[in-house]
Amino acid sequence: GGSGGGVGGLNSDGNYIPATPGEISVNGSSSGGTTTPHNNNNNNTTMNNPYMTQSNEDTEWIEISRDQLYIPHTEDIGRKLKVEAAAYSIDSGELLMHRVIKTDLVLSRTPEPEKRNLVTAKPAGGGGARFRIVTYNILAEIYATQQQYPYADLWALSWDFRFQNIIREIVDVGPDIVCLQEVQADHYESHLYNAMHEAGFEGVYKQKTRQAMGMTGKVDGCALFWRRTKFHLVESYSIEFNELAQRQVTQGMGLNPRSEEGASILNKLSKDNVAQLVVLETAQPSMTRGNREPNQVCIANTHLYSNKDCPDVKLWQTLHLLQELETFIMARGPANLPLMICGDFNSTPDSAVYDLLSRQLVHPGHPDVNTGDENGPSVLPDIMSITHSHMLGSVYNTVLGEEPKFTNYTMQFKGVLDYMWYSTRNLRPLSAAPIPDESVLTRHGDALPSTQYSSDHLMQISDMQIVSGGSR
């Protein structure tokens, strides 16, 4: 590598200060290679202004490699790289083609997020199989725009950069079950499935019902993975809320979907959201005193509608998801399959969605069920019918005594939207990883996503245990 030149460094706050970029013209041709600019100017005025460019006469390029692959080193930080490639005729030696590409400044890599420590619940004896489960909205590329996140560095929003961080973050936790939301269809095929498979997982994917945004694959959905050495798949289903809406309008309400009323309700409820449902069986059945312990668990993964002005739609989606799960579990006999419902519910702990999940009912006076006529047609049943038979607990609330302060941390919104719910009859949370403090999250940016945290959401992590005999 070339010596000299302006190399960036850390200021007193620990922030990276890039060195001055040089604007270089390329003269002549080369047989190919990588070069870096070398600054011969000892005048320091430009070093004090990172936006001032140097003149062409003051800078030259130093050749640092002729290999086909070059991986930037720490000494390249604060400089630009230039790649030259030339094609010559085998017969005449004549130069046929010459291309030059210059990079932006090479940046120092942001430290990885700090390791998440698990807080353990009060110990309880007995129990069956244990597993670690995570839920994580990974921020699809189609939503990771400069308009949405103007405070984030553009390069830190790029999928190629974020993907590496996200995969590393997930795998480092050592999970057995992974529930992901905002997984882009083309990225599941091209990136995510292969990376997770290499890390020892098998998985299923369900994209949202809507058509892609522009090109094929530019639509997000949910992905659910399980560790192959821990579980094998028994059943897998997907739920489309648009389909449930169609069924309610035609069968439940007896309306023609083309009538004004039917079309109005369908239009309000058809938001393309989906859920996944799998039954997993432990690869090694646990044995206790000669009895075969229950070794199956049902995992649901969902991402509910995001519009904050439509709490009634989210409540409708939650109710119908719970009803579908009720039917599914009851059809499997009296054994009471352990159930977890994970995902991004786009609902805070003061919402009707949270009340329905945690308390099996919603108070008639709750503002989410009294939205008024200006919010479109009423889509909810009678308040007494908004109920279900699942006894559910929130993992984080059970282990830590309260929900986190936030699971989504942007400039526009900071609050809890993501949860892991479990059936209290036959599952026990053993631990949960607290969400990092604000001081930690804002070390490398004002909000998420940042150069350190590659989604606007934070992963939730828990160790769970299957409990037999119906005790909590």
Image (cartoon, grey):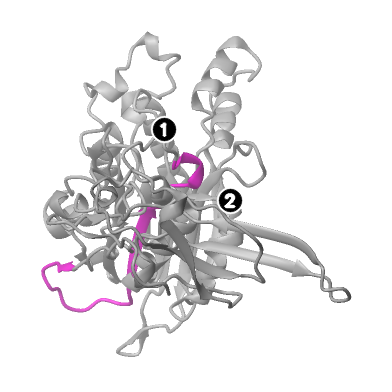
Could you tell me which secondary element the residue under label 2 belongs to? helix
* Tag 2 residue: 185
- Reading the image, the residue beneath label 1 is 147
Q: Magenta includes 23?
A: no
Where is residue 400 shown, x and y percent of the image? 13, 57
Vertical order, 249 against 7 (above or below): above
Which of the two discs, 1 and 2, sits closer to the camera? 1
Q: Which residues are magenta?
A: 118-144
- In the rendered structure, which amino acid carries the disc numbered 1? Gln
Asked if residue 127 is among those painted magenta in the image, a careful observer would answer: yes
Mark 1 closeness class: few <14, some 14–19, many ≥20 residues within 10 Å: few
Q: Secondary structure at mark 1?
A: loop
> With 362 as the anchor, is 143 left or right in this view?
right
Query: Which mark identifies residue 432?
Result: none
In the shown orientation, is residue 61 left or right of residue 189?
left
Position of 229 relative to 458 (above/below): below
Which residue is at a point 28% across and 70% down the rendered structure image? 467
* Depth check, front residue: 354 or 118: 118
Question: Disc 2 marks which amino acid?
Answer: Ala
Looking at the image, can residue 54 be seen? yes
